[in-house]
Structures are given as C-alpha cells and as structure tokens.
Image (cartoon, grey):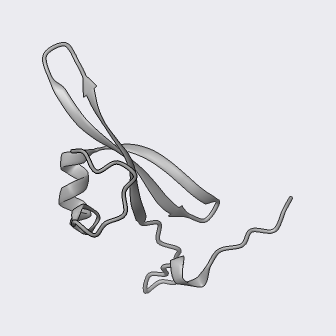
Amino acid sequence: DEPLEILLDEVHIDDKLRFVEEPMEIMDREVKRLKQSHIPIIKVRWNSRRGPEFTWEQKDQFRKKYPRLFTTNAPSTNAAS
C-alpha cells in the first residue's frame, strides 16, 4: 500500500472530528434522455479520504444543496448548461 497524501486546505473536519466529504468542482455536464423526459446531470469531483472520487448527480437537486458550485467563478471544464 502506498501512503495517502491529502493537502490540509482540502480537509474538512466537523465538530465531532469526523472527515467531511464535500464537492470540489463540476467536471462535466450531460442530459440523460429517458422516454418522455430529459434530466440534466453533472459529474462532480469530491474530496474523498481515498483520493479523487467522481459521481454523476442530478443538476437540480445538487444546485439546491451546493449553490456555490454554480456561480460564474466556479471551476468547470464545460460551461454549457
């Protein structure tokens, strides 16, 4: 096993000294097409204890929980909505 190295400015600890995983940036955007609907989804990079972790999330729900990632200054590899 290789040693795990995490930058201190990316580590978030809650009041009970537990590691808090938070989204770091939006990496990509797509629209999932179903039979009669289209669902905007985003690929999110998280600060995970195990290193970089990526998940696809529904854009609408994610925007409500983490609005800071949707500002004009937020890092993103694809600016299209």
Residue 22 on image: x %, y %: 42, 66
Q: Which one is in front, 61 or 73? A: 73
User: Residue 51 lies in what quarter of the image?
Assistant: bottom right
Residue 46 on image: x %, y %: 47, 59
Examine the rendered structure and indicate whether residue 78 appears above or below residue 38. below
Task: State the residue lying farthest toward the left.
Answer: 36
Residue at left offset 28%, top offset 51%: 79
Q: Is residue 1 found left or right of 54 in the rendered image?
A: right
Examine the rendered structure and indicate whether residue 48 appears above or below residue 43. below
Residue at left offset 47%, top offset 66%: 21
Residue 3 on image: x %, y %: 81, 68
Examine the rendered structure and indicate whether residue 47 appears above or below residue 55. below
Residue at left offset 34%, top offset 48%: 78
User: Residue 7 lies in what quarter of the image?
Assistant: bottom right
Q: Is residue 37 found left or right of 29 in the rendered image?
A: left
User: Residue 34 lies in what quarter of the image?
Assistant: top left
Residue 28 on image: x %, y %: 38, 45
Quarter of the image where the C terminus is located: top left
Residue at left offset 23%, top offset 61%: 70
